[in-house]
Image (spheres, rainbow, N blue to C red):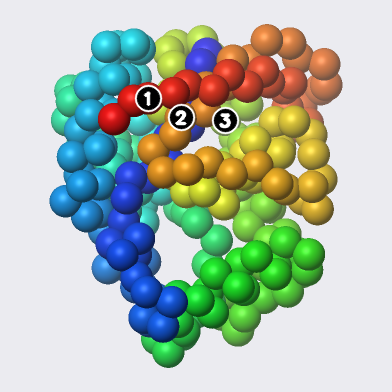
C-alpha cells in the first residue's frame, strides 16, 4: 500500500494582510489559482499513479482540492473529520498576524489551547487515532491519496517516524506531496509501521 499525502491547494486566506481578520474554516475555500493548481495536481497524480482511493478532511479548502483531483481521476471522495486541521479556537476578531504568532508559539507549549479550541496534543491524539485505524485496515487493495492540512500532515509524519509531539518541525508547502511507502513492520499493533519518506516534486 502506498500512502500519498497532499496538502490542500491555495486557500483564500493566502491573500490576507497582517491586520486582516482570519477567515473561518467554513468559508476558507480555494482561490481561482488554487483551483487551477488542484487540477494540475490531479493531472500529475493520474499520470504517475493512476486511480487511487481518496480520503479527505471535510474542511472546505481540503474538500474542494480533493473533489477537483477526484474529478480528474474519475473516483469519489470519502471524508474523515479526524483529518481536519487543528481547531485553533480563533474568534472573529483574531487577525492573521495574531493567528500566525499563536501557531508558532504553540509548538513550544503543546498543551496550550484557546477556549473552545484544541491544543497540539489534542490534535495529535485525533490524528493518531486515524493512523491506527489506517494500519488496522490495511489490506493491500490499492493506494490511498490523503488530502489534508499542514498541521495534520506534520502529525502524520511524526507518528510514522515515532517522533514525540515536541519534535514537530516538518512542514509541507501548499500542494507538495509526501509519498510514504510502508517497507518494514517492527512493532506490534497499535504502534504502527516504520515508513520511508520520499519527496514528490510536482511542477506547476
User: Where residue 202 is drawn, which disc sits there?
Assistant: 1
Instruction: Point out the frontmost of discs 2 and 1.
Output: 1
Q: Secondary structure at mark 3?
A: helix
Q: Residue at x 62, y 73 (%)?
A: 102
Report helix, strand or loop for mark 2.
strand
**Residue 113, percent from left and from top:** 67, 75
Relative to 116, is 1 above or below? above
Crowd rating for badge 2 (residues with CA inside 10 Å; few <14, some 14–19, many 20+): many
Marks 2/1 in contact by CB < 8 Å: the verdict is: yes
Q: Which is nearer the N-term, disc 1 or disc 3?
A: 3
For numbered disc 1, what is the local secondary structure? loop
**Which class describes the residues within 10 Å of circle 3: few (<14), some (14-19), or many (20+)?**
few
Quadrant hosting residue 107: bottom right
Rendered location of residue 28, percent (x, y): 30, 64
Q: Which residue is mark 2?
A: 177
Q: How far apart in space, not on screen, are marks 1 and 3 (Cα)?
A: 26 Å
Which numbered mark, 1 or 3, is in the foreground of this view? 1
Sequence-first tag of 2 and 1: 2
5 left or right of 118 in image: left
Q: Which residue is mark 3?
A: 134
Residue in front for this viewpoint, 71 or 166:
166
Q: Position of residue 159 (x, y in %)?
A: 71, 37
Q: Is residue 118 left or right of residue 106?
A: left
In the rendered structure, find residue 115 and report the number of the disc placed on it. none
Q: Compared with residue 47, is residue 67 higher up or lower down, i.e. above or below?
A: below
Q: Earlier in the sequence, mark 3 or mark 2?
A: 3
Q: Is residue 129 visible?
A: no
Amino acid at each position: 500500500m502506498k500512502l500519498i499525502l497532499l496538502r490542500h491547494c491555495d486557500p483564500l486566506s493566502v491573500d490576507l494582510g497582517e491586520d486582516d481578520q482570519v477567515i473561518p474554516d467554513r468559508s476558507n475555500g480555494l482561490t481561482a489559482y488554487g483551483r487551477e493548481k488542484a487540477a494540475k495536481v490531479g493531472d500529475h497524480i493520474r499520470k504517475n499513479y493512476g486511480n487511487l482511493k481518496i480520503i479527505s478532511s471535510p474542511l472546505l479548502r481540503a474538500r474542494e482540492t480533493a473533489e477537483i483531483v477526484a474529478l480528474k481521476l474519475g473516483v469519489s471522495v470519502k471524508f474523515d473529520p479526524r483529518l481536519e486541521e487543528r481547531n485553533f479556537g480563533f474568534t472573529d476578531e483574531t487577525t492573521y498576524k495574531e493567528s500566525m504568532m499563536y501557531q508558532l508559539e504553540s509548538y513550544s507549549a503543546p498543551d496550550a489551547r484557546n477556549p473552545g479550541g484544541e491544543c497540539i496534543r489534542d490534535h495529535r491524539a485525533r490524528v493518531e487515532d486515524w493512523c491506527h485505524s489506517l494500519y488496522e485496515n490495511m489490506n493491500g487493495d490499492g493506494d490511498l491519496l490523503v488530502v489534508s492540512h499542514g498541521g495534520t500532515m506534520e502529525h502524520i509524519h511524526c507518528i510514522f517516524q515515532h517522533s514525540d509531539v515536541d519534535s514537530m518541525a516538518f512542514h509541507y508547502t501548499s500542494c507538495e506531496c509526501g509519498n510514504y511507502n510502508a517497507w518494514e513492520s517492527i512493532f506490534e499493533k497499535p504502534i504502527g509501521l516504520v515508513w520511508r519518506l520520499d519527496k514528490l516534486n510536482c511542477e506547476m
